[in-house]
Amino acid sequence: MSDKFDVIVIGAGPGGYVAAIRAAQLGLKTACVEKWVDNKGSAVLGGTCLNVGCIPSKALLETTYKYHEAKAGLNVHGISTGDVTMNVEQMVARKDKIVGNLTAGIGGLFKANGVTVLQGMGKLLAGKQVEVTAADGTATVYAADNVVLASGSVPVNIPPAPLADNLILDNAGALDITETPKRLGVIGAGVIGLEMGSVWARLGTEVTVLEAMDEFLAAADKDVAKEAAKLFKKQKLDIKLGARCTGTEIIDGKEVLVKYTDSEGEKELVVDKLIVAVGRKPQTNGLLAADSGVKLDERGFIFVDDHCRTEAPGVYAIGDSVRGPMLAHKASEEGIMVADMIAGKHGHMNYDVIPNIIYTHPELAWVGKTEQELKAEGVKYKAGKFPFAATGRAMAANDTDGFVKVLADEETDRIVGIHMVGGQASELIGQAVIAMEFCASAEDLQMTIFAHPTVSEALHEAALAVDGHAIHMANRKKR
Ligand code: FAD
Ligand code: NAD
């Protein structure tokens, strides 16, 4: 038996690395196990989010939005740019550099906080022991008073579209395309499909997205989904609903024939690259010994209670490998809650106030309940909506698409949901999250001073509109 730790965290994604840093900050002797290795055999920290998820995708989105603005968005300001060109290899290299800096930064934070990195595949044994099998095959067993499982998720593959080198790609491969494809197919009009579809549509690629469901963005508020569908159509993202992929064929090693069915029958599509983005599933292969005491639920997620406790005493699980939305900030906050609980503190996680964002342009963002959910639950609510087109700052920025919608309980006035489509919705939603976390009423927001001129004023006006008091638009007559 090797060293004993107060806490061993398995997985160094945004759930695991945050839990490890917090635990070490609270004075606990902490180790973090990570199986991902670079070509020198060192642990790659940061998980999906930093390496092949949130950060690289946002780097590509930022670059391509700047290109799009330079090419088509500046004329209106009287700025002519001449011939704007795009070097895709440089875009990808810049993305890789950002990823490298951030993942190295986690190593630095671990060092600064005294977290021990154990490179290797972690397996939870009985009695809170963790076996770590390094890349060279050596296995070492460590004991711990507490174990945090943060093994994350992997992409779902579908039999009709098996991955094929450089042609049929999952979300990781999709981030490394180094030449603008003429035609791109995407299976799945979810978050990855819309974000990666936007990246390439901005560079002039013909993008076709095949979505199996008949409804677009079913989890979003209907107003958001409707507005987004309209705007994406204008951006030439061809989203086909009710379209099920039935098979794929590689033609001459350079094109992909995609067969699918929709309401009109069998169809075919030929593309230069195909991205499969149909969701992700928990990663638990090899993680649990048969007698670890940890159970999986019927969907393969690690079974936990509201405080991320598994069925095995002293063993917690967080992030994408447990129930709830697969989001980096959800994973991180669960990590903090669990580390706090292990250190004897209370631990806090408000599952009702987790923001969701889709980083297209405009961005889609929401927190709390949708109108459809409130109706289904029989909650009586008031709604106020305000368009960015009526705010001076959005006009100045020539970024007027979208709106903010505030939903408040009709009886108590407490805000129960905020939904938005807008150029800066990813930042603006933070104000909505703070308001909801502090249990604000619509009146609280109405009485708050918002700086002028800012796009945030749309949130203020939407809160005022809840009671028919928006200043800068004609209010709908209330019943
Ligand atoms: P992960 O980040 O998956 O990390 C798990 C880690 O555990 C990995 O490093 C893995 O190698 C390691 N591991 C697994 N099993 C073992 C084992 N047995 N032993 C040792 N190590 C192990 N979320 C957002 O909030 N915002 C975004 O903008 C966003 N964009 C995304 C874009 C893409 C393309 C993708 C794919 C995802 C995106 N996500 C985004 C989702 C986000 O990446 C995940 O929710 C987040 O990474 C989950 O964190 P985690 O720590 O639970 O798991
Ligand atoms: P997703 O769940 O967002 O979307 C998958 C889509 O594919 C759904 O609309 C689904 O109906 C569709 N689909 C499923 N099977 C299909 C099939 N056979 N044919 C056609 N369509 C099919 O999943 P994703 O886009 O792969 O993203 C995975 C996870 O990563 C998400 O859960 C998300 O939380 C996370 N993520 C978050 C962000 C962000 O926060 N901005 C960005 C990217 C990914």
Image: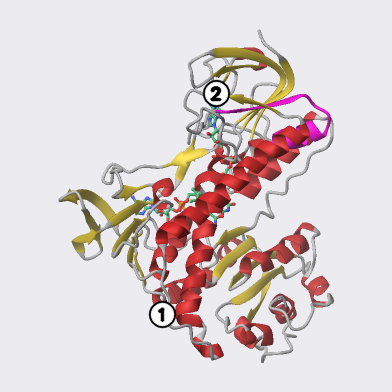
| Percent coordinates x, y for residue 461 in the rendering | 72, 81
Q: What stretch is highlighted in magenta?
A: 19-34
| Left or right of 270, for residue 53 | right
Q: Which amino acid does label 2 sit on?
A: Gly
Looking at the rendering, which quadrant does residue 178 occupy?
Answer: bottom left
* Secondary structure at numbered mark 1: loop
Most distant residue in the left direction: 252
Q: Residues within 10 Å of mark 1 (few under 14, many from 20)?
A: few
Q: Which amino acid does label 1 sit on?
A: Asp
**Magenta span includes 296:** no
Disc number placed over residue 120 in the picture, else none: 2
State yes or no: discs 1 and 2 in contact (Cβ < 8 Å). Answer: no
Q: Nearer the viewer, mark 1 or mark 2?
A: 1
Q: Residues within 10 Å of mark 2 (few under 14, many from 20)?
A: many
Disc number placed over residue 83 in the picture, else none: 1
Most distant residue in the top direction: 1
